[in-house]
Image (cartoon, rainbow, N blue to C red):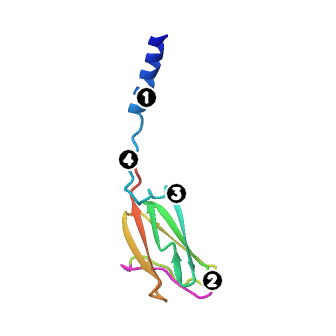
Amino acid sequence: MKTKLFLILLAVIFLVACGPKAGPTPAGTLPPAQSSEAKVSIANFAFDPVALTVTTGTTVTWTNNDTVAHNIAGDDGSWGSNSLATGDTYSFTFTKSGTFSYHCGVHPSMKATITVVTPYP
């Protein structure tokens, strides 16, 4: 009976030791969402969230929930939207990792960032 119990315990230890390894998450951070979609709301002359982390291949959709027109303008000028009236949306798919700062071209004090990371293996 002891031998059988020992073999079962040994098998469990072996399976746990050989299972997939979870990498540590740095303190104070959360791993990025593994979704292929993310949403940003525009309201009260602000982007919400103001900082977003997603994985490569994620499509971010902005919705203008404000009472005035806004637009999305990548700080580097490589991406952005036309004017968005109340209720309008704009979507952009991030295919490269990096930090992408953007602002509202109509109201330059409105600023936000999207950090794009490669998914964990």
**Secondary structure under the numbered disc 1 in the rendered image:** helix
Whether tag 3 and tag 1 are in contact, CB under 8 A, the answer is: no
Residue position marked by numbered label 1 in the rendering: 15
**Secondary structure under the numbered disc 4 in the rendered image:** loop
Amino acid, disc 3: Ser
- Left or right side of 101 for 65: right
Query: In this picture, which residue range is highlighted in magenta?
Result: 67-77
Whether tag 4 and tag 2 are in contact, CB under 8 A, the answer is: no
**Front label number (4 vs 3):** 4
Q: Earlier in the sequence, mark 4 or mark 3?
A: 4
Above or below residue 104? Residue 60 is above
Whether tag 1 and tag 2 are in contact, CB under 8 A, the answer is: no
**Secondary structure under the numbered disc 3 in the rendered image:** loop
Of residues 46 and 70, the one drawn nearer to the viewer in this rendering:
46
Residue name at image x 39 percent, y 53 percent? 25
Q: Residues within 10 Å of mark 4 (few under 14, many from 20)?
A: few
Residue position marked by numbered label 4 in the rendering: 23
